Image (spheres, rainbow, N blue to C red):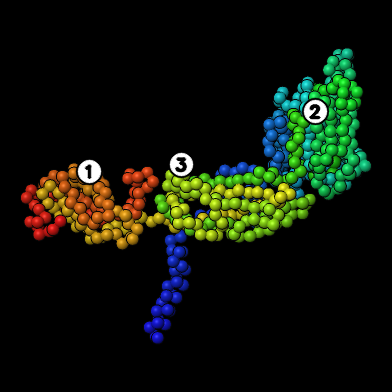
Amino acid sequence: MKKVLNCTFALYIFFLVSGSLYGVGEKTISLGSSFTWRLAESRTGLIEAGSIRPNPVLMLSAEAAAATSLDLSVSFNEGDPRLYRDSLGHYSVSASPELEAVEQRFARTGTGAALFGGAASNGSPVTIEPRSRSALFAPGSQIGDFSIEFWLYPLNMENGEQILSWVSTRQNSTNRGAYSFQRILCAVARNRLQWSFIDFFTSVDRASNININLAGNTPVIPKTWSHHLIRFDSDTGLLEYLVNGRSEDIVYATSSGREAGEVYAPVAGEAGSFVLGGQFMGIMDEFNIYNAFYNNASMEKYTRRGGRTETRAIDLGESYSSIIRIDASGGRTSIRGTRASSEFRENGRFRFSDDSEMQFFIRTSDNPYRWDNDWYSFIPGAEIPADIHGRYVQLAVDFYPSSDGETSPYLEGLFITYIPAEPPLPPQLLTATAVDGGVQLRWRNSPNPNTTGYLIYYSDTRGEYFGEDAALGPSPIDAGRRNSLVIDGLRNGTLYYFRIAAYDHRDAAGSTGYHVGEFSREVTARPLAGLSLQALGIMD
C-alpha cells in the first residue's frame, strides 16, 4: 500500500510541475488584444475601433461602399475637423474652428461624425468647393442625374436651422452683363426639412428658369438619427425627397410641372460652394453626392455582405509545427442613438441571438506562397485536427451583421497555440571502419520515435562536408532508416571525415527537402588497399 501511495504522489508532483503533457514545448502567437492587429493585414469592410473594449477591436465598417456613381464622399471619420476630406478628391473641404468631431459611439456610421453648434458655429462650419473639372458641381457643369444624401441627428429642430446650402452665380443668357443668383437650400420648418431650388433648373435654350420647393411630411425627431436623400432623374424631370427610405415629396422639373413637357436640367454657375450646418445644432454623418438617380440607399447600418480579414503568412519557425488550438475573444456591439451596448465572450461559437456572427478559418503550408490545404473552419478554443500542421499558418475571420443590420460582431484578440516541430536528435555511438576503397559506418538510432531516416555527410577536409567521391553520390547520402552503411568508391590512403544527422520527414516537394536535426559527433577513417570487413573480423 505504501508503494502505491508513493507512486501516486510522484505522479502528482510530475503533473504539478509540468502542467500537462500537451503543454510541454507549447508556444503562443497573439494578434489584437494588448498587441497590434498588424498581422491581420488584409481587411475588407472592416475598421479598427478603439471605443468598444480597452484594446482596439476589428468590427464591421458602416461606411457606404464606394459606388461607381459617387461624386463626393465626406465621412467625418478623421477625428479632427481640420482633416475632413472628400475621399474621391473631387472637392476641397474646410472646417471652421468652432466645429467639433464626435467619436464612434455618437456616430451613425464609421468612427466619427461632425458636431455643429448652431449660431455659435459662426455661420460656415463646413465649406465644400469643387477642385476638379470632373466634379459634378464644377463651374459651368451641365448636371444630369444627381442625388444628395446625409444622416442627421438634430438636437432641437428649431425653425430656420440651415442644414445645407449651395450658392452660385450664373450669367444671364439674354443679358450677358447680368448675373442670376442660384441656390439650393435645405432648412428646418415646423420640425421638417424643406428644400428650395432657386434658378437651378434651366430650359434647354437656357432662356428661362424654374424654382422648386419640396417639404417632408414626416417630422424629424430630435436626438434620433434619420436619413435624408434627394434625387433627380434627368430623363423624366422627377425630383424626389426621401426620409429614412420613404418618399416624402415629389416634384417634376418640367415645363408642365407634371411627367410631360420639356425637362428643365440643372446647370451649375460660377464660384459655387456647399455650406453644411450653417445654422444647425446637432450631428451630421456621411454626406455624399452621386452623379446618378440613387436607388440603393440602405437604411441598414452595416451591409449584409459583411466583412473579412485575413492574416499574412505567420512563420512558426519549423516545418510540420502542430497547431494545438486557436483562442479568440470578442463579442457584438450596437450603437442606437448615442447609447452603446456590448456583449463579450471568449471562445466557442461567436453566434448571437440577433443573427450577428463571426466564422473562423485556418490553413497551413511549408511554403508561404503555396498553400497545401484549403481553408478549414474551426471553433475557437477547440482542438485543431492533427493534419493541420506546417511552418506557416494563415487565419481568416468572416464578420456578419445582425438581421436588422444594426449590430456588428467584433474581434478583440486571436491567440495561436502551437508546438514547433523540433528536429530529431542525432544518432549515437557513430563508428567508422576503413576497408579497401570505402568506409563502413555504424550508429545507434536517434532516440526520437518520429525519425524516418538519416543523412550521411562526408568530406576529405575537416568541417567541410561537401565530398563527391562516394559511389552512392555526393554528400549528403540518404541512408533511409538503416543504421549501418558501407560508403565505397572512396580513394585509398585519403583520410575522410563523417557526421550523421537524423530527419523526421521530407517536404511536400519530394526528396530534396528534409527536416534535419543536428550533426552527430565527427568520426574519421582512411581506406587502404587490402582491407576488408571479413579480414577485420566484422560481418557486414
In which image quadrant can residue 67 be found? Answer: top right
Q: Which residue is mark 1?
A: 473
Tell me the SS state at disc 3.
Answer: loop
Q: Are marks 1 and 3 in contact (CB under 8 Å)?
A: no
Q: Position of residue 399 (x, y in %)?
A: 63, 49
Q: Position of residue 370 (x, y in %)?
A: 45, 42
What is the three-letter code of the residue carrying label 1? Gly
Identity of the residue drawn at 22% across and 48% down:
458
Q: CA distance from mark 1 to mark 3?
A: 32 Å
Work out whether 11 lies above or below 375: below
Q: Position of residue 258 (x, y in %)?
A: 89, 26
Mark 1 or mark 3: name the one nearer the start of the chain: 3
Q: Which residue is mark 2?
A: 233
Identity of the residue drawn at 43% across and 44% down:
367
Residue lying at the far front of the rendered structure: 260
Q: Which residue is mark 3?
A: 369
User: Which image quarter is the C terminus in?
Assistant: bottom left
User: Which image quarter is the N terminus in?
Assistant: bottom left
In which image quadrant can residue 341 be found? Answer: bottom right
Work out whether 100 lies above or below 421: above
Tell me the SS state at disc 2.
Answer: strand
Nearest the viewer among 155 and 391 is: 391
